Amino acid sequence: MTTPGATPVVYIHRRDCGATTGYSYNVTIYSTDRELGSGSGNVFVGTVAEGDESDITVEWIEKKTLLISLRGDWKAFHETTEYEGFSIKFRRR
């Protein structure tokens, strides 16, 4: 998803960390002039209980403000409210 009038994009992706751990879900902001995977950009990293009815969505609510909506019982390992001039807001439902 691209922000209106700017170059960064947001990716929601799932990582498999091995047989003894569950999946982690990341929300990452990347600049379109940077190669995917170069630099962190992670603004949220978390997990949910297996079988939980969970959902994660993102939405640009202003030019420089990203809203991350989390439905379900999320455990956050990393959560930031600012990244490279962007404001990050969270809504738990």
Image (tube, grey):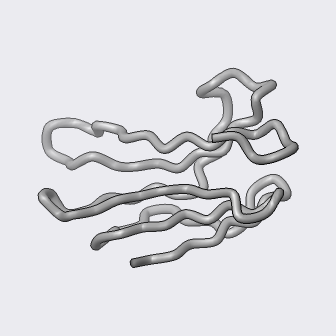
Q: Where is residue 15 in the image (x, y as percent from the top left)?
A: 35, 38
Near-viewer residue (18 or 83): 83
Q: Which quarter of the figure is the C terminus placed in?
A: bottom left
- Residue nearer the viewer, 2 or 32: 2
Q: In which quarter of the image is the N terminus?
A: top right
Q: Residue at the spot x=67%, y=35% of the render?
A: 39
Q: Which residue is drawn at the image coordinates 76% and 40% (left, top)?
A: 8
81 to the left or right of 76: right
Which corner quadrant of the image does residue 51 belong to? Answer: bottom left
Would residue 21 appear left or right of 58 to someone viewing this image?
A: left
Residue 29, x across and y down, in percent: 66, 44
In the image: residue 11, left or right of residue 46: right
Q: Residue 77, percent across and down?
A: 43, 63
Q: In this view, does 21 lie above or below 17?
A: below
Q: Position of residue 33 (x, y in %)?
A: 80, 25
Write the residue at 55% across / 40% down: 11
| Residue at image point 34% right, 59% down | 55
